[in-house]
Amino acid sequence: MIRDTPTIDHLIVAARTLDAIRERLYWECGFGLVAGGPRSDGLTQHLVPFDAPHCPYLEVYTVHDERLAKERPNGRTLLDATTDGPAALLWAAAVPDAARTAARLRVLTGEDPGLRRGASVRADGERLPWTEAGMAAARRRPCLPFFQTWHDRPTRRARLPRELAAAGHRCTPLSYTALEVETTVDDLDAWLGTPAADLGVRVRRTVSDRPVAATIATDAGPVRLGFDR
């Protein structure tokens, strides 16, 4: 069997307005935000950078143009998910080789895993290339992660000092120590290719299929960011 051991890379959360999530992150967790920039689908991206060599982070989306957001699938998903307030949308597992993970998923599911190459474009225009797999399945069932391999790690690491300074954290996030997901289907271990518990992923057997909370190690101790409903 092809294996490509994953780690928790980032959690994607969303809110209707920037203030709704910025205040919560700062006062409940001690985290500041770095601007990522507006997108053509009516959404704006922000990041919470972590101080760690492997560069995990929290990705935050808000709405800057509701009309555009309603016209695009990503925007409609965010609007639907945030009717009652901020929500966790998706999560990503970092792997050494997304192409190898895609091959494993193809054997596992018999479906095209959607291997895709692209880049994250920061507010200053710098492009950070990645390869991902499994996004379509993760969108259908957000309890499952998509898989991402980041390239040019030296450039990502070189950005950390200025991103941490720009964020102005009250306490600095370091790593994900736990992620809580809800699902009724016992297939997360197979999807990950390793026991979910080994990654710190805790599964609740409920009727939904979504991430609901993360525990994050910081320089001031652990904090829990929850979106339970």
Image (cartoon, rainbow, N blue to C red):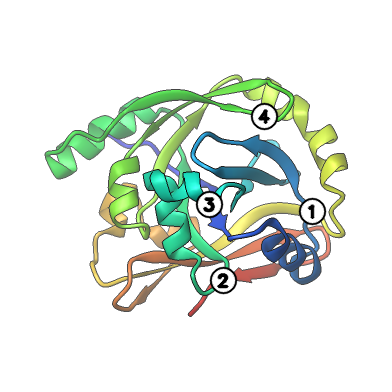
Mark closer to the chain start, 3 or 4: 3
Mark closer to the chain start, 1 or 3: 1
Separation of residues labelled 4 and 1 (CA atoms): 16 Å
Task: Confirm or deny contact between disc 2 and disc 4 (CB under 8 A).
Answer: no
Query: SS at mark 2?
Result: loop
- Determine the image quadrant of residue 158: top right
- Determine the image quadrant of residue 29: bottom right
Separation of residues labelled 3 and 4 (CA atoms): 22 Å
**Which residue is pictured at 16% across the width and 44% down the height?**
109
Give residue 85's mark.
2
Whether residue 137 can be seen here: yes
Amino acid type, residue under disc 4 in the picture: Arg
Separation of residues labelled 1 and 2 (CA atoms): 19 Å
Amino acid type, residue under disc 1 in the picture: Gly
Separation of residues labelled 2 and 4 (CA atoms): 26 Å
Is 222 above or below relative to 103? below
Left or right position of 177 against 97: right
Query: SS at mark 3?
Result: helix
Is 156 above or below relative to 29? above
Separation of residues labelled 1 and 3 (CA atoms): 24 Å
